[in-house]
Image (cartoon, coloured by chain):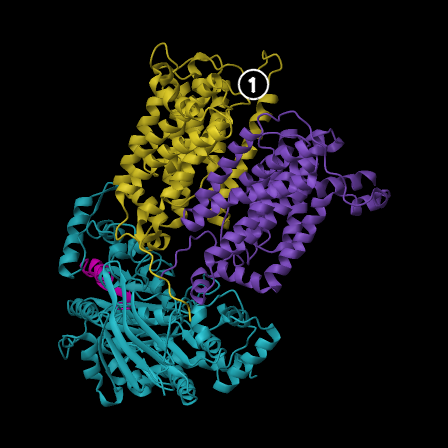
């Protein structure tokens, strides 16, 4: 029996949103098989990673806290990727956003006032934006590929953390640990549900997703991003300059990554530490794709990826699954999703094999 | 003597289309056989099956009397079938020699291959330097590579797919000489075209296809162009309706000393172009592809900016404005490439209307898109221009080429632009749609707009335009009233400078 | 004098994996495919090479395993992008994420377990003299990289198969219509790229740091991708680029070791230098007029025959 691909007349909307769901389901099935084959409790691993965080109400707060930065960064990336601007340095912009917020927190150390947090947020967004402006400048002025520059800047940004917390920003009372001092009260993000770790960043993430969805579907800005990504030549004909679009895409995604960074440092961390870069910026790439570059989808995908993070930690303690397994599950999800993409524009038809004739 | 090639009951089906329906005809040795039909009649599909690119769903191919299956182009070449494609399968970054080597199935040392290439080139007067990079060659020269490549395998059947659409009239004559010489040596030629006068001039017999079905096989020398055209198109031909003795209004569009920068390696910029178009006038720009037409359209539409006064409407300079700014001032444009330039294939028609009509028709309020207005306008375009589409929500990519072109032309014309610039308005469009587009352009001009038509189709320009100029290597000839210029004159202008440089560059073997 | 020689030896060692990986990617890109998963394939090759070296102590077997593992990883990429025409950029990123996770999982039980470094290829007597050491004192991969530069160059420009590969990268539709298997050629190129990335990865435990560490390739795969752009898709220029980066990375090592004047600058800046240098190099190359004209015309575009 043979199969053949046949182009659909119209791209399938059903497949567009069914494939991410199928990708997650396939990841669970194939993941269980593979991990069983290499000697782990495969079914247990899938149960702990994908289901326990949902069934255990105590883990929900963790989900929210992990999902927030993924959603905020993922929304930004979904906007940039729509325009075919491949910002893969969100991790670096997240780091710089966190550092900018830290700078304000340290400057205002010991002070009080409602204005400190908004100032930190502003600094964080500007920091992420500024760091994303470098690839934007190089791409628009010199046609340097933004994938490579934004990624290289990520590696550099991590070294910047190490330097700052080793020398100028080091906690004087920290007994030599390379970290900053704990932020003062006014520079910490408030918890919104008493008795939990759910901070203000969680509702902010949801709002960011909703606003972005409205802008992307209804506004000329959203149209610009979509048309430049779908057909750059047509966009130019329609009056949308490619350079301006690249700038907008990188600045918006950089600002959102920076926002996520400052919310993380002011929320869960409350100080800058060497472990601040936690790969949210890279995982958000998966979030953006799994959410089909649609901000509403990104909210859902952010929660899914947060589940795997929280579940990965659960599996580590309960069945001794190495933490790296989470990364494999996440990559598998992306693989299955990308494999399913072809079903959006093509359908699979069964071909009845014809009796073959000898060639001349 | 058996037929060289014999097709019996060839049928090929694509999703939703019957591309070839029970087609039967035969080609004799040494015969020049025309395959005639409109775009979409199934000519290309048919020859792709002969050349092994596709397989027929039913039917039989016989070669020199024996039934054969042609599983791939390699097998076709082994049989002695050569093909020159309409869209050349050339590699721009590689040399002529490398390109030809790639097309050869046998591994021939490059020195020996070069000697054989030079032999063929001298024998048929196809002069080229084998070591030049293809990117630096003109379209006519590129076609010679394809022909040389096909001739190197001593074909017994040469398939030519619309070979003259990119050539000047003089180049066409040279090509015909080569083909006649080949036929005299016993090579059969299957000549695909929809240009009737060419077929009458060249071919011994003609097979006419319409909608995938065989209509007739006839002797073109016994037919009139009109009778063949009617067989090809079916229904009676429609002529463009226009008022005789129209007068033109004031100068509307004034282009003065317009030049563009060379953008890419393969780009031909516009060089000091000046012309004026009056209200009610249709101004035609003829020329062989790749002589600056794209740059001219982009410079007029606003994709490329220029000096402020290089382009003016009613005396107001627009040169510094982008496409949006120019549209607001009444200048709309339709580029040659439909999918990906004039329209976004993955977008709905409604979203495609937003692309160019959002400002003139008030589809944007405070940065937000009024999708209802876009939908209504798109519905009107679909209705007024008889676009075959399910509705405004259909994606542009789901439309056939002709319907998409009707939509695009309708989208611009219904904005009532005071100046409309169009490139290749009926390229690859069936006759019915082409007639509708031509009529719409004539009507727009009659309503007082100035229109610029850039086209490679001389017949179209001569039927449509009041005034003609020719673009060659980015320079525009002086404009002349259409009635006063002959095809030969236009042909000379089209070849002009180009032909001269070609002859100098070529290295005689 | 001795220091200079020592530096040269270190530079050559540091450059070798980048050079090998970049050569593989160069061939892949010449065929019109952009595989951004080099970093991931290197990590997979690194852990495969490490595990085999740890258990067998046979470095050649380790290199071979690295190549096999890299090829296997590249086949995932190939299947998605070539057979299912998935987006190459996204798939490459996914491969890197996968490689990072896979190598971390496979290596989780090997941390802090040393292996032996690969021994020099040629007899010790040749490397006795300092100059002799600079020329003859390296292990197999260093010479392998050199030979491959020449071999890839010869293949691309002087063989028919190389011509076909370039043709597929320049114009896939034409190559298809002439009758070449675009997908087949690209699969072979992608597999070659995977094998080379795998070998490059295996060089890390065999040549540089004789143990397993998560993410031990530290972005070198991305630098290899950047080097291909820097080299304008030409093998000989790749050689120059790789050695330039080897020098930058060697300076970092000396700075960390407290190497005199170099230590005035914070060590973190030295550590960031290879990445910043990559950006600078990309900027410099973009200033050349022919910067992108050498890029294969079909680079990164999925191929679906139009007929």
Where is residue A134 shown, x and y percent of the image?
Answer: 49, 40
| Quadrant placement of the C terminus of chain B | bottom right
Q: Residues within 10 Å of mark 1 (few under 14, many from 20)?
A: many
Q: Colour of chain A?
A: yellow
Q: Is residue B59 visible?
A: yes
Q: Disc 1 designates what residue?
A: A179
The one nearer the camera, B93 or C51, is: C51
Asked if the stretch drawn in magenta spans residue A100, the answer is no
The one nearer the camera, B424 or B395, is: B395
Residue C200: image quadrant is top right
The one nearer the camera, B70 or B110, is: B70
Q: Colour of chain C?
A: purple
Q: Residue furthest top?
A: A195
Where is residue C55 shown, x and y percent of the image?
Answer: 66, 32
Numbered range of the magenta stretch: B405-427
Q: Is residue A355 left or right of residue C144?
A: left
Q: Colour of chain B?
A: cyan
Q: Is residue C267 left or right of residue A267?
A: right
The one nearer the camera, A52 or A264, is: A52
């Amino acid at each position: 029996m043979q199969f053949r691909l046949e182009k659909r007349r119209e791209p399938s909307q059903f497949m567009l949103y069914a494939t991410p769901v199928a990708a997650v389901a396939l990841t669970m099935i194939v993941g269980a098989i593979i991990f069983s084959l290499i000697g782990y409790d495969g079914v247990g691993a899938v149960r702990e990673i994908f289901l326990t965080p949902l069934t255990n109400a105590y883990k929900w707060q963790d989900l929210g806290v992990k999902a927030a930065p993924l959603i905020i960064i993922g929304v930004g990336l979904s906007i940039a990727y729509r325009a075919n601007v491949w910002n893969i340095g969100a991790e670096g912009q997240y780091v710089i956003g966190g550092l900018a917020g830290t700078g304000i927190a340290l400057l205002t150390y010991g002070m009080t006032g409602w204005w400190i947090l908004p100032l930190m947020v502003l600094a964080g967004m500007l920091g992420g934006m500024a760091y994303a402006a470098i690839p934007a400048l190089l791409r628009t002025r010199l046609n340097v590929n933004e994938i490579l520059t934004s990624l290289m800047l990520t590696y550099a940004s991590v070294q910047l953390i190490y330097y700052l917390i080793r020398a100028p920003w080091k906690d004087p009372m920290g007994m030599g640990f390379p970290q900053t001092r704990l932020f003062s009260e006014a520079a910490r993000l408030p918890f919104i549900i008493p008795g939990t770790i759910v901070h203000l960043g969680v509702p902010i993430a949801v709002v960011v997703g909703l606003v972005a969805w409205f802008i992307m579907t209804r506004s000329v800005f959203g149209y610009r991003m979509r048309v430049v990504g779908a057909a750059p030549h047509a966009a130019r004909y329609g009056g949308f300059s490619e350079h301006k679009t690249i700038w907008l895409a990188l600045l918006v995604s950089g600002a959102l990554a920076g926002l996520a960074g400052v919310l993380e440092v002011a929320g869960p961390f409350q100080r800058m530490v060497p472990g601040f870069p936690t790969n949210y910026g890279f995982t958000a790439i998966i979030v953006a794709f799994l959410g089909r570059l649609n901000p509403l989808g990104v909210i859902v995908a952010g929660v899914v990826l947060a589940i795997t993070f929280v579940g990965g930690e659960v599996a580590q303690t309960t069945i001794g699954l190495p933490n790296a397994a989470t990364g494999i599950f996440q990559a598998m999800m992306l693989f299955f999703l990308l494999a399913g993409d072809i079903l959006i524009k093509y359908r699979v038809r069964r071909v009845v094999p014809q009796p073959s004739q000898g060639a001349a | 003597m058996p037929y060289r090639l014999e097709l019996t009951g060839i049928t090929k089906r694509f999703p939703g289309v019957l591309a070839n329906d029970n087609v039967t005809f035969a080609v004799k040795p040494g015969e020049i056989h025309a395959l005639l039909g409109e775009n979409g009649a199934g000519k290309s599909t048919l020859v792709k099956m002969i050349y092994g690119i596709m397989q027929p769903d039913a039917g039989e191919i016989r070669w020199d009397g024996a039934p054969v299956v042609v599983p791939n182009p390699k097998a076709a070449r082994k049989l002695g079938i050569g093909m020159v494609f309409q869209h050349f399968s050339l590699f721009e970054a590689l040399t002529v020699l490398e390109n030809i080597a790639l097309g050869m199935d046998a591994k021939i040392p490059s020195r020996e291959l070069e000697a054989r290439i030079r032999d063929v080139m001298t024998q048929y007067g196809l002069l080229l330097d084998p070591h030049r990079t293809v990117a630096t060659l003109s379209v006519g020269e590129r076609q010679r590579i394809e022909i040389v490549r096909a001739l190197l395998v001593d074909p017994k059947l040469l398939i030519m797919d619309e070979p003259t659409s990119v050539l000047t009239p003089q180049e066409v004559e040279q090509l015909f000489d080569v083909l006649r010489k080949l036929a005299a040596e016993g090579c059969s030629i299957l000549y695909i075209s929809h240009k009737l006068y060419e077929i009458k001039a060249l071919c011994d017999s003609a097979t006419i296809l319409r909608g995938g079905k065989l209509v007739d096989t006839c002797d073109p020398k016994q037919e009139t162009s009109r009778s063949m055209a009617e067989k090809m198109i079916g229904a009676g031909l429609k002529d463009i309706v226009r008022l005789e003795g129209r007068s033109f209004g004031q100068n509307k569009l004034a282009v003065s000393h317009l030049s563009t920068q060379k953008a890419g390696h393969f780009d031909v910029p516009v060089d000091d172009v000046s012309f004026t178009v009056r209200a009610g006038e249709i101004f035609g720009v003829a020329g062989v592809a790749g002589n600056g037409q794209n740059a001219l359209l982009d410079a007029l539409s606003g994709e490329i900016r220029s000096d402020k006064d290089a382009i003016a409407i009613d005396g107001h300079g627009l040169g510094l404005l982008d496409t949006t700014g120019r549209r607001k001032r009444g200048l709309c444009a339709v580029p040659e490439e439909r999918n990906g330039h004039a329209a976004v294939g993955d977008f709905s028609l409604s979203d495609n209307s937003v692309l160019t009509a959002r400002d003139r028709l008030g589809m944007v309020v405070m940065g937000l898109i009024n999708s209802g207005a876009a939908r209504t306008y798109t519905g009107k375009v679909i209705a007024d221009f008889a676009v075959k589409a399910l509705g405004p929500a259909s994606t542009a990519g789901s439309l056939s080429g002709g319907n998409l072109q009707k939509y695009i032309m309708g989208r611009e014309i219904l904005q009532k632009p005071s100046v409309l610039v169009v490139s290749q308005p009926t390229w690859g469009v069936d006759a019915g749609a082409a007639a509708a587009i031509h009529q719409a352009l004539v009507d727009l001009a009659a309503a007082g707009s100035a229109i610029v038509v850039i086209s490679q189709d001389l017949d179209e320009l001569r039927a449509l335009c009041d005034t003609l100029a020719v673009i060659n290597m980015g320079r525009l000839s002086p404009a002349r009233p259409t009635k006063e210029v002959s095809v030969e004159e236009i042909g000379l202008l089209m070849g002009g400078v180009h032909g001269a440089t070609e002859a100098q560059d070529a290295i005689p073997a | 004098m001795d220091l200079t020689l020592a530096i040269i030896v270190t530079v050559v060692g540091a450059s070798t994996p980048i050079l090998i990986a970049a050569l593989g990617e160069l061939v892949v890109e010449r065929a019109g495919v952009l595989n951004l998963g080099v970093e991931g394939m290197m990590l997979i090759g690194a852990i495969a090479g490490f595990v085999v070296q740890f258990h067998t102590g046979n470095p050649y077997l380790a290199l071979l395993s690295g190549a096999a593992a890299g090829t296997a990883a590249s086949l995932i990429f190939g299947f998605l992008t070539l057979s299912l025409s998935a987006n190459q950029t996204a798939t490459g990123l996914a491969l890197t994420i996968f490689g990072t996770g896979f190598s971390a999982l496979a290596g989780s039980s090997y941390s802090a377990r040393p292996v032996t470094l690969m021994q020099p290829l040629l007899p010790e007597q040749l490397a006795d003299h300092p100059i002799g050491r600079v020329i003859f004192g390296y292990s197999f991969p260093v010479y392998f990289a050199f030979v491959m530069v020449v071999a890839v160059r010869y293949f691309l420009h002087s063989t028919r198969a190389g011509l076909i590969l370039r043709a597929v990268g320049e114009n896939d539709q034409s190559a298809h219509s002439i009758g070449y298997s675009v997908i087949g050629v690209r699969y072979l190129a992608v597999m070659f790229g995977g094998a080379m990335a795998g070998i490059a990865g295996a060089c890390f435990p065999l040549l540089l740091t004789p143990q397993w560490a998560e993410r031990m390739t530290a972005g070198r795969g991305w630098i290899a991708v950047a080097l291909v752009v820097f080299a304008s898709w030409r093998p000989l220029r790749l050689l120059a680029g790789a050695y330039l980066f080897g020098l930058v990375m060697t300076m970092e090592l000396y700075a960390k070791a407290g190497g005199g004047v170099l230590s005035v600058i914070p060590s973190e800046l030295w550590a960031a230098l290879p990445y910043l240098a990559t950006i600078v190099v990309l900027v410099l190359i973009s200033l050349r007029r022919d910067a992108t004209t050498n890029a294969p015309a079909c680079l990164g575009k999925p191929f679906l025959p139009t007929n």
